[in-house]
Image (tube, helix red, strand yellow):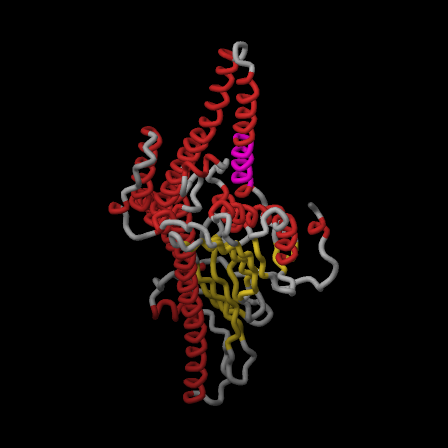
Amino acid sequence: MTIRNRITLWFTLLVTVLMLISVTMAWLGTRDRLYANLHAELQSKVEKIQEVYDGMVFTQQQLRPDLKFNPVVPELLSEIVAREGHSSQYGSFMQLSTLDGRVFSRSFNLGQKRLPFQQPGITQVEKFKINQPVATRVLYASRLIQIQEQVPITLQIALPLTELDRILQQALLWHVLELAVLIILAILMGQFLSRRALAPMVSMTEEVQAMEADQALDRRVDLSKLSPDEIHELARTFNGLLDHISESLELQERFIADASHEMRSPLTVIRGHAQLVRKRGREHPELIEECLENVIQETHRLERLVTDLLILVRSRQSDPPDQELDLVALLRQILNEYQPLHPQIQARLPDQMLWVQGDPDALKRVVINLLDNALRAIGPEGHIELSVRELGAQAEVIVLDDGTGIEAQHLPNLFKRFYRVDTARSRADGGSGLGLAISKEIIEAHGGRLAAQSEWGQGSQFVFWLPLLADPPEDGPAPSWVLKN
């Protein structure tokens, strides 16, 4: 089911439920008002009979006080009905009887029929056969008529409900027709509103389908056609997603192109030396050793390039590090490995422990990458300083050298993949241009940040920050990873 049909269905159901409630309340209100009118009429007739008897008693006391009043007057109801007219609002049937059920007066519309005798105080809806072959629904009531110093008599009244039922049935029919018309209108209105509401979505869908058909990722949904609402926000988000996808595809294509270019060079060298050996190796055996040495070097270079590429990919796919480690102890381990071969590296490390959460092998690779870059930048008399300190809630690690430095135009691109400041020198010493990119990925995966500062001829400074553990472990023996070589 389409969204348009679902909106129409829910809108129609809502209108139907509301109209059912409204129609039901209106019908019940009409019924209650009609029954209230009947009860008022019934009470009026009881009061009228009571007034007639009171008047008769008063008249006899005035004219013949010596006579005892006889309440059994057979012609009483006939005279009252004849005096007031038989055609009341709904018509009525009345009879008077003694307490033992003997009927002595009836309204002339009863003819020879009698209303059933029931004890006074009852008001209920019943079915009686009164001058008709079928039973008629009536509002039946039995009431006491008090007579001064006399035994009371009972009045039975039956108000036919035929007209009331007809009015209620007619009202119900009109309400049902009204409900049917409103349901049809709700369906039409729901279709119209859903079409208007979803028109921007339909237009957006058509644009996206056109993009898919043309494979045009450079196109975007036209936001100028949309109102500032949720669909506009969806389209804006979709355009942003397309921007990220296009950027990712562009970076991927550039990455593949750069990786292919980097791999082509050692493969070309390997193929050239292999062809040289096959062509001239028999006449010049001394070339074989030289060519094999070059092939081995280029193979090592290619192996390092593939390893760096795998590390770069895995740094994005791996889970966040969760090992607690002392950053100061990790740096001391690296210095123990590097200082015997590179005495120009100096250290400034605190005595306290700085606990961070991370992967020791990955962080060790970052520091080694920065030290290797610094070693390539300094001369025979140059110096490198490795330091770490606590800076607020972070640990700050600095690799400072007094080498040649980096020109300002290179600084914004330092951490891009395959970017080299000095292409010739980097290729000569086996650099792939991935070291700093890998270091940046690793530090960011640890929730930190890597930055560089440099001036040409003034040396360089690489700094990275890592968040310290809020609840570091208690001081104890060095963790097992520090003891690894």
The relative height of residue 77 versus residue 344 in the rendered view (above or below) is: below
Q: Answer whether residue 103 is visible to the viewer in this image.
A: no
Q: Nearer the viewer, residue 218 or 264?
A: 264
In magenta segment, residue 304? yes
Q: Report x, y in % for residue 68.
A: 51, 84
Task: Find residue 79 and report its horizontal and vertical position in percent.
Answer: 39, 70
Q: Give the prevailing secondary structure in the magenta stretch.
A: helix
Question: Is residue 450 found inside the magenta-colored segment of the image?
Answer: no
Q: Outermost residue, left direction?
A: 224
Q: Is residue 392 visible?
A: yes
Q: How many marks?
A: 0
> In which quadrant will I find the C terminus?
top right
Residue 423 pos. (x, y %): 41, 38
Q: Nearer the viewer, residue 369 or 466?
A: 369
- 255 relative to 54, above or below: above
Name the residue furthest right: 477
Residue drawn at (49%, 82%) of the image: 69
Front one among 240 and 5: 240
Q: Residue at x 32, y 52 (%)?
A: 229
Residue at 39% x, 57% y is 22
Q: Quadrant of the N terminus?
A: top left
Question: At which x and y percent is residue 177?
Answer: 35, 47
Against 223, is 301 above or below? above
Front residue (pair 272, 231): 272
Judged left or right of residue 232, residue 315 is right
Q: Which region shows up in magenta?
A: 302-314
